[in-house]
Amino acid sequence: MNIKHLFLALISMMIAIFLMACSNEESGTETNNNVNDDSQSESDSESNLTESGLPIVKEKITLDFFTAKSNLNVNEDWNDLFLWKEYEEMTNIEINWVEQVSQDELPEKRNLTLAGNNLPDVFYASNFSSIDLFKYGQQGVFIKLNDLIEDHAPNLNQFLEENPDVRKGLTFPDGNIYSLPTVVEEEFLSRRVAPYPWFHKEWLDNLKMDIPETTEEFYQYLQAIRDNDLNGNGENDEIPHGGVNIDNLFNWLKGSFGIGQNGSSTYYESDPNGEGLRFIPTSEEYKELLTYMNMLYEEELIQQNIFSIEWAQFMATAGEGKYGHVVHYEPSSTFGVDLGEDFYVGGSVLEGPNGHQTYANITSPLVTVGNFVITNENPDPAATVRWLDFFYSDEGSKFIYMGIENETYEITDDGEYVYVDEIESSTERDIAISKYLPWVGINPPGLSKLEYFQGSEGSPASIKVTEKIEPYIPEEVWSNFTYTEEENNFLTSVGADIEKYVDEMRDQFISGSVPFSEWDDYVNTLEEIGLEEYMEVQTEAYNRYSSN
């Protein structure tokens, strides 16, 4: 009986093995068929590409895009927008703008889309953080772009070769690039150094003062505004320095106190006393800057509600011409009223008490990292990269910011590019532009050039003030660093606590709600939160950045 049972068991085992082998063979056939299907699809996509230029594809394709839009043009359907319809004809690629969200809705809608089961082929102008780019890149949701850039983006490639710091800012710790950026030509300084310092010209003249050139002269100018009825209305309503926040004044003054030598970073920079990095907010120079700003605030030379002022109140006060000094975008085109082009005159960077004079508030040519990502749902990444690469060319930059000659813009006898009268004469110019072109209120991925850019940074007054600033820009301006997953986890927890505490204490030291006698307690608290590890993370990121 046992022998019989054993024989039957062996027969059963042999049958099971045979059936499993057949199943594996069938499964392998299916897998191979899938691979072949993918390869065939990729081959079809590549064969549909033209060799170069426009159109991009021989047979028309359609891609689904998610995009953020300005609140001004959120009601303009980009599926019918003039520029995109023109580009469809030029490229033979139709863009189906499946999701068009306002800036206010962007974070929520972007996250909901990522969490869903129906990804777009591209996220356009969606401003992903470096943390999210690396996270979803590692997961394979956002595809790697290194080879695609090399093979299909000659315009971007050329820009990256000419601006190696931009490539550093795009490259993640795993060596991959997961997004195509918004960049500005290096020579377009007026955009990279904005906002700018402006002084009330009539009040300077009445006071018989020149534009301040040192922090001491700036202090004296603000005092003179406070102590004199310069608008002649018999009221003490002149405001020496006003702003929509304290940040702009702080960033303008940094370079006068020896900090910000690598650009606009608030928290770290190369150590002026040795190799590596230093943490700016515990340095003596930083403390000296806050002490100076506290003096200005306590003497009521800074608008007293600057830490909480609403945009509408700032604009209304600015429109009344009550500010003696602002750090802002070009006033005649941004304050909403016609103050006249000569109402404010631009300044430069002040020489500080120890001879420092650097314009620290300058950004890298890399404006935005995460404004164009291609998802793993995209059926034709090569064509998609070529679609965007056009906008890194001179012609593409002109196209997105100006449109089509004689339809949306004209060239003056002086060779300047101006919008047609229908747009230029509109009382709501930005809205008028938005009916034809998509760039208003976003940073469109691609190249921004001074010749074509129509924002306030390209105005004659902005260019003129930039010429005063240019001699004082630092030699080495960094792009933002990128981080590993572990570093990101630290920076979004402990690192965020450190930066939040620094920002809160900065405002409290300036306002006087925390006295400088508590400075050592402030430094000790940062060390207790985890400052040493924070700087280790930044140093590792800096070392990778330097070696990219």
Image (tube, helix red, strand yellow):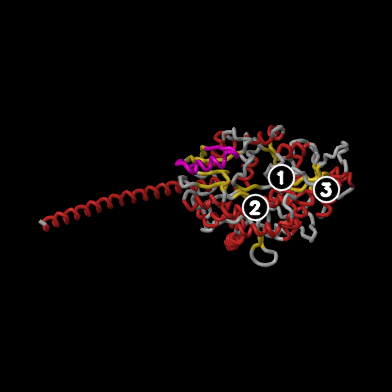
Quarter of the image where one finds residue 398? top right
Say whether residue 468 is left or right of residue 137: right
- Indicate the amino acid at tag 2: Tyr
Please say if the residues under marks 1 and 2 sit with CB atoms less than 8 Å apart.
Answer: no
* Mark 1 to mark 2 CA distance (whole Å): 16 Å
Q: Can residue 171 be seen from the camera position used here?
A: no
Which mark's residue is nearer the viewer, 3 or 1? 1
Q: Which residues are magenta?
A: 99-120
Mark 3 near mark 1, Cβ–Cβ under 8 Å? Answer: no
Q: Residue at x 81, y 48 (%)?
A: 299
Q: Which residue position is annotated with label 2?
A: 501
Residue 225: image location, x then y, percent: 85, 45
Q: Secondary structure at mark 1?
A: loop
Between disc 1 and disc 2, whose residue precedes?
1
Give residue 466's position: percent from left, percent from top.
75, 50
Label 3 belongs to which residue? 222
